[in-house]
Image: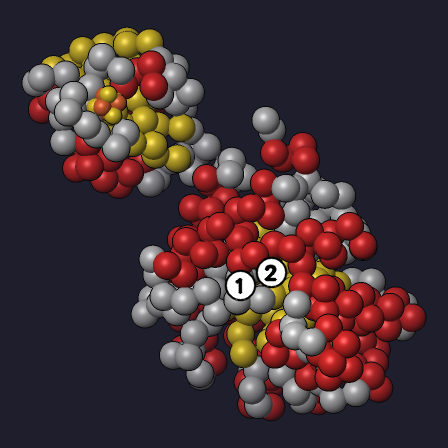
Amino acid sequence: MDFTSRRRKTRQVKVGSLTLGGGAPITIQAMCSKEAKTPKAIISQILQFEKEGCDLVRIAVPNLEIARAIPEIKKKIHIPLVADIHFDFRLAIEAINNGADKIRINPGNIGNVERVEQILAAARKYKTALRLGVNSGSLETDLLEKFGRPSSEALVASALRWVKIFEKNKFKNFVISIKSSGVRETVEAYEMIAKKCNYPLHLGVTEAGIPPYGSLKSAIGIGALLLLGIGDTIRVSLSSDDPVEQVRVAHQILKSVGLYNKEPEIIACPSCGRTEIDVIALAKEIEKRVAKIKKPLKIAVMGCTVNGPGEAREADFGIAGGRGQGAIFKKGKIIKWIPEAELVDEFMKIIEESL
Ligand code: SF4
C-alpha cells in the first residue's frame, strides 16, 4: 500500500522557507540540547544538525539575551528557527520581533488568554508561525478536574479550546502538538485531534527516554501515526549524549515507513544456519559506502544465494553470500557472480552506474 496517498489533508503553514502540511514532504525537527546555551554554541550545534539533514531547528529561549541573539544566530544558519517559550509571553514577543520563524508555546502555561492574544497579535504582524503545544504538564486545572487525569481526551479538549481562541483572533498560521510520554495515549490523542481540525500536526513522543528504548518508543508512536496518514513534521525527543541522534533516528523512522526519499535504505537478513557470508560486516560496509547517494534506493544484504535474492526481491539491488563467490542481484534476479573479496567494489560500481 502507498501510505503517502493516505496522508491527511491539512492547511499549509509557512515557516521561513519551509512549508508544513498540505501534502508537503514531512520535515524533521531537532532541538538544541543543554550544551547550547550561548549563541556560539547554538550555532555550532545547529550546523551539525543541518549536516545530518535536519529541516527545522528549535532552541530554548529562557531569557531576553537569547531572544535578542536570534538575528545573529539566523545569519549563520540555513534552516528555519523555532523559539521555544515557556511561561513568559514577553519572551515570545521578543523572539518574534527578533525574527524567529516560528514560536512554540504551550498556551496553558502562558498565564492567561490576554497574554496568549498578545503573542498572536505579534505573530500575525510578522507572519510568524506558531506551534500550539499541549502536554500533560500544561493541562488546565478545570480540564484535569473534569477528566480526572491528563488523558488523551483531556489533551484534545485543551488543544481544541486554544484552537478556538486562535481562530477568534484570526490566527491560522499554526501547527498543533499533543504530547504524552505514553505511546498509547499519544497515538490516541493525535488520532482524535486529526478528526477534529485540519491544522498540520507536529508528532513526537515526549520524554521518550534514553536510546535504544527511547528511539523505539518514538519509532512506534510516530511510526504508527505516519502509517495512519497523520503527521506533517516530526521530532524525536531523546535523552542522548549526542543531540544529532534525534535527527538520525527521525530519518530512520521516515525511511522505515517509506516517507524519506533522500537516501537509500539498507535491508539485511537476520542470518541463519544457511548463512554463507558475514552479513553484519557487509551490511555495515555497504551502509557506509552508499551514504553519499541521495536517492531512495532499497539495497539488500542477504546471507545465502539459495533464499536471499527471492526473499529480497523488492530490493533494487542486493548482495547474497555464496561460499567464497558472492552474487549480485537486481529485483530478485542474480546478474553477476563475483569472488567475495571483490564483491563490495563491484556492487558499488553497478549501483553507481545505474544512477
Ligand atoms: Fe537464512 Fe538465507 Fe534467509 Fe539469510 S537469506 S535468513 S541466510 S535463508
SS under mark 1: loop
Give residue 346's position: percent from left, percent from top. 21, 21
Q: Residue at x 71, y 89 (%)?
A: 90
Q: Which residue is mark 1?
A: 182
Q: Is residue 42 visible?
A: yes
Q: How far across and down, in percent of the image, does residue 315 sit?
A: 39, 22
Q: How many marks?
A: 2
Q: Which residue type carries mark 2?
A: Glu
| Residue at the disc numbered 2 | 185
Q: Is residue 219 above or below residue 346?
A: below
Considering every residue shown, the one lying at the far front of the view is 148
The three-letter code of the residue at mark 1 reads Gly
| Ligand 1 occupies quarter | top left
Q: Quadrant of residue 117?
A: bottom right
Q: Residue at 76% across / 43% down in the picture? A: 9
| Figure coloring | secondary structure
Q: Is residue 97 visible to the viewer in this orientation of the structure?
A: no
Q: Using the image, tell me which numbered label, if any, was put on residue 40.
A: none
Residue 233 picture quarter: bottom right
